Amino acid sequence: MTIPTGNIKIFLGIMALGMAACASTQPSTQGSENPSALKPCPRSPNCVSSQGPHGKQYILPLAYSTDPDVAYQALIGILDAEKRATIVARKKNYIHAEFVSRIFRFVDDVEFLFEPDQFVVHVRSASRSGSYDFGANRRRIEHLRRLFAAALEP
C-alpha cells in the first residue's frame, strides 16, 4: 500500500503546525525572584520538581554526603557525558541543562539547585512543549539520580 504524496505533505504540514503551536522559549526559572528556589511546575503533567507540593509532580531531590564541590563537579561530569544534553548555565549552586529528544527534537529543561547545608540537590525537569511527556522527565531524573549516586560512591 502506498500513500499518495499529497497526503504525506498534508500530514507533515499538520505535524509542523502542531509542534509550532506547542513550542515555547527557554524559561527563566531560577535566580530572578528567589535565588534559592526553582520555578514551580505548571499544571500540565510534563514537569517534575523536588520543590513543589507532594503530588504527582513531586520527585525527591538528589542526596549526597560528600563535599558539595565534589558533588557539583560529579553532576557536571554526568551531564557532559549524557547524549543529547547541553549545559546552558552554571552558577555557584545552580546548573541548567537542555535535553533534546531523539526523534522529534523536543527540548526539556532540567535544573539543579544545590543546598549545600542540607546535602541535597533540588531538581526540576520540564518539557518546553506539549502537555504530556509520557513520564520522560521523571525517568530522566531517576536515571540521573542513579548516575549521581554511583559517581559519589567511595
Image: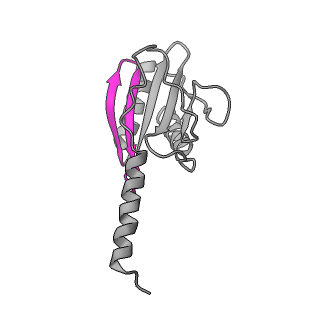
49 in magenta: no
Q: Residue at x 57, y 47 (%)?
A: 135
Q: Residue furthest bottom?
A: 1
Q: Measuring 40% from the left and 61% from the top, which residue is drawn there?
A: 14
Residue 42 percent location from the top left of the image: 54, 32
- Residue 138 percent location from the top left of the image: 56, 42
Looking at the picture, how far across and down is residue 37, in whole percent? 50, 18
> Does 150 appear above or below 17?
above
Q: Horizontally, is 45 left or right of 75 in the view?
A: right
Q: Residue at x 46, y 23 (%)?
A: 113
- Which part of the image, by quadrant, shows the N terminus? bottom left
Q: Is most of the magenta stretch helix, strand or loop?
A: strand
What's drawn in magenta, residue-wise? Answer: 84-105
33 and 116: which is toward the camera: 33
| Residue 145 visible, this orientation | yes
Residue at image coords 66%, 37%: 56
Residue at the far right in the pictured view: 55
Q: Would residue 103 be seen by someone viewing this image from the given angle?
A: no
Above or below, 37 against 43 in this view is above
